[in-house]
Image: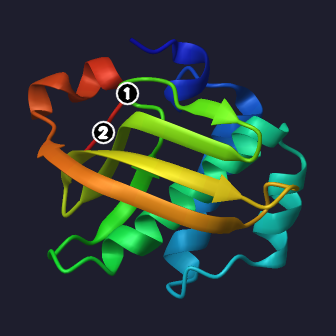
Amino acid sequence: MHSSSKSSIFGGVVVKKSAFVLMAALLQAAPSWAMDARFAASLKKLDPQTRLEQVCDLEAMSRISRDAKPYRPDRAKTDVMSHPVHAGHTVTGKGGAFRSKGRWYSFSFTCKGTPDHMKVLSFSYKIGEPIPESKWATLGLWR
């Protein structure tokens, strides 16, 4: 189970919420998945663990969009069904979710970042099952 302090943008930490909103705006404005200076500056204001989760969220969307399956992720969260585990510059999770074409899917991942947690060095993932819409509200997901 997850706590609402980090996993829900509705009840989330204010800094993470603003970074998530900024990330969403950036993704709509920059289809190349490139990190612009405003997003980088915003990331630097976050604590290191949250920063790593944010860059891993972005990397998840980038990698999944290039997957052979026809996914087109527009949101990803590494902490939906369970909190990811941090070990140094690596975060591992079994409770992530991404949204594609209005549906949410579970995924697990391992993401290794640079020492400053501003970039991803390696990322592996496995896409799971679709998350039933009846569970979205409980998990802090939306249409």
Quadrant housing the N terminus: top left
Residue 117 at least partly seen: yes
**Going by the image, does 62 lie left or right of 125?**
right
Residue 29 picture location, percent across and down: 57, 79
Which coloring applies here? Answer: rainbow
16 sits to left or right of 43: left
- Is 96 placed left or right of 40 in the picture? left
Question: x, y (%) of residue 135?
Answer: 18, 24
Q: Residues within 10 Å of mark 2 (few under 14, many from 20)?
A: few
Instruction: Please state which of residues 86 and 77 is positioned toward the viewer in this rendering.
Output: 86
- Give the amino acid at mark 2: Trp
Label 1 sits on a secondary structure element that is loop
Q: Identify the residue at horizontal 70%, vertical 76% (top origin).
A: 35
- Mark 2, residue position: 142
As displayed, is residue 34 above or below residue 3?
below
Nearer the observer, 71 or 24: 71
Q: Are marks 1 and 2 in contact (CB under 8 Å)?
A: yes
For numbered disc 2, what is the local secondary structure? loop
Point 66% across, 65% down: residue: 120
What residue sits 51% from the left and 25% below the top?
83
Q: Amino acid at mark 1?
A: Gly
Query: Residue visible at 12% across and 44% down?
Result: 130
* Residue, disc 1: 140
How far apart marks 1 and 2 lie (CA) works out to: 7 Å
